[in-house]
Amino acid sequence: MLMPLQIAAWTGQVVILLGIVVLATMGSRTMFQRLLSPACWIAFFYTLWFLVPQLVSISNNNFVIGFPEADGRAVLMSQVYLCVFLISVWTGFLIVRCVIDTGSRSAAAFAPLRLLDERDKWILGVFYAVGLLATGYLGLKYMGGEGARSVLVKSPVGIVMMTLSYFAIFAMAVILGHAVSSRRYVIGVLTLLALGSAIFFTGARGRLLWPIAMAVVFTWMRSDRINLRFVLVFVVLGVFTLMLFDPLLAMVRTDPQDVDYDQLEERVSIAHLFLVKRNFDGFANFTMIVNRDWAAYDPRVYLTGGRLSFMYTYFPEVWKQGVGFGTTIPGMCWLGGGAWGLIGGGMGYGLLMGMFNFLMKRIRDEPLMWGLRFRDELDVCRRGEFSRVSRQGICCRVSGAGLGAADSQALGAERCGRDLPAE
C-alpha cells in the first residue's frame, strides 16, 4: 500500500534535484559552464547514493543493507526527510542566486582547447610517475597482507603513499582527457592500463573510475556537447568494473585451491552492488540514522564530519576493525541537530555550493579547472567525511596550481619576448 507514496516521494526528489540544477546553471552559455557547476555533481552523486538505491530497496521488499528491521514506513519516512533536505539545498542556491549571482554579471568561460605543451607534459609525467610508484607500493602491501585496506593506509607510510597516489590519478585524468580529445588513443590506453593495473591490486575501484569520468567530461567541454556514445561506454565500463573488481581481486588474493567459484559468481550481479556490498550505501545509512535516531546530536559534526559519531553509535565492532561507512551530507546534518539540523545544514550546504557555483562561472585557467573540479567528491562531500577527502582535494588543487604556475611562467616569457625590441 505504501509503494505509490514511495514512488511519489522518489519522483519529488528527482523534481527538486532538477530544480537545483536548473537554478544553478541558469544563464550558462556553454557546456563547459554547466558541467563546472557543483549542482551537476551533486545530482550525479545523489543519483548513485540515494535515487538508485531507493528503487532497489523498494523493488526488494524495502530491504535496507545494515538495517534488517526496516519496512515500508521506515523507507518512506527517510524519503520524506530527503525531500526536506533537497528543498533546503535549493533554498540556499536560490538565496545566492538572488543576492549575488544575478546572471547579469556572468562572464563567459574560456573554452579549454589548448593542447598540452612540453612544460605540462613534464609536470604531469612527474606526478604520474611518483603516484604510480606509490600506488604500486600500496598494491604490493595489500596483496601481501590480510585485513582491510583502511588499516594499511592509516599507518604513517601508508598515509604518505596514499597522498602521493592522488597525484597520479589527477595526471591520468588530464592526460587521458587530452589524449581522447586529440585522438591519440594509444597514449590514453597505455596511461590507463599502467595506473589501472596498479590500482587494481589496491582494491580501490573508485580511484580508477573517477579519472575516467573526468576525462569523458573534458571531451564534452571541448566539443560543447554531450556524446551519448561516451556516456554509454562509461556506464557499461563502470557497471562491469564494479561487478567484477572485487570478485577478481578476491580470486587473486586467494589460493587457487581455496577459491569458491560459485560464491564468486553470485557476487557478479547488479543487486549485489546495492543489497550486499556497501558501494552505494548512502540511502541505507540515512534510513538507519533517521529511524533509529540513537546518536546524540552534536553540531560539531558540521566541521568534523559525522563518520565517527555514526560508526561509534551503530557499528562499533566494525569501527574497531578499522573499517568505516560514510554518513553522506544528509546523514551528517541529521547527526548535527535532527530534523532542524537537516533543514539548517541543507540550507547552509546550498549557500556554500551556490557561492562556489558563482565563483566557478568566472574561471579562466584550465589547469585551475582541473585542480578544482577533479575532487568534486570534496565539494559535494557525498560521504560526509571532510577529514578524509581534504587530503585528496589538497593534492589535486596543488597539482592544478603546479600546471597553472608553469603556464603563467611560459605566458610571461612569451610576453617578454614580444616586448623586447628587435636587434
Image (spheres, rainbow, N blue to C red):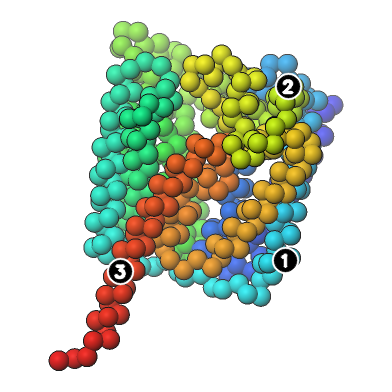
Residue 279 placement, left or right of 92:
left
Residue 10: x %, y % from top left? 74, 39
Label 1 sits on what residue type? Val
Q: Earlier in the sequence, mark 3 or mark 2?
A: 2
Residue 260: x %, y % from top left? 40, 11
Element assignment for label 2 = loop
Q: Look at 43% across and 52% down and name the residue there.
A: 397
Label placed on residue 409:
3
Residue 20 visible, this angle: no
Q: Mark 1 and mark 2: span between their CA atoms?
A: 39 Å
Task: Say which residue label 1 marks.
Answer: 99
Residue 167 visible, this angle: yes
Residue 276: x %, y % from top left? 56, 21
Q: Would you call the spot at circle 1 few (<14 residues within 10 Å), some (14-19), or many (20 or more)?
A: few
Task: Say which residue label 2 marks.
Answer: 294
Label 3 sits on what residue type? Gln
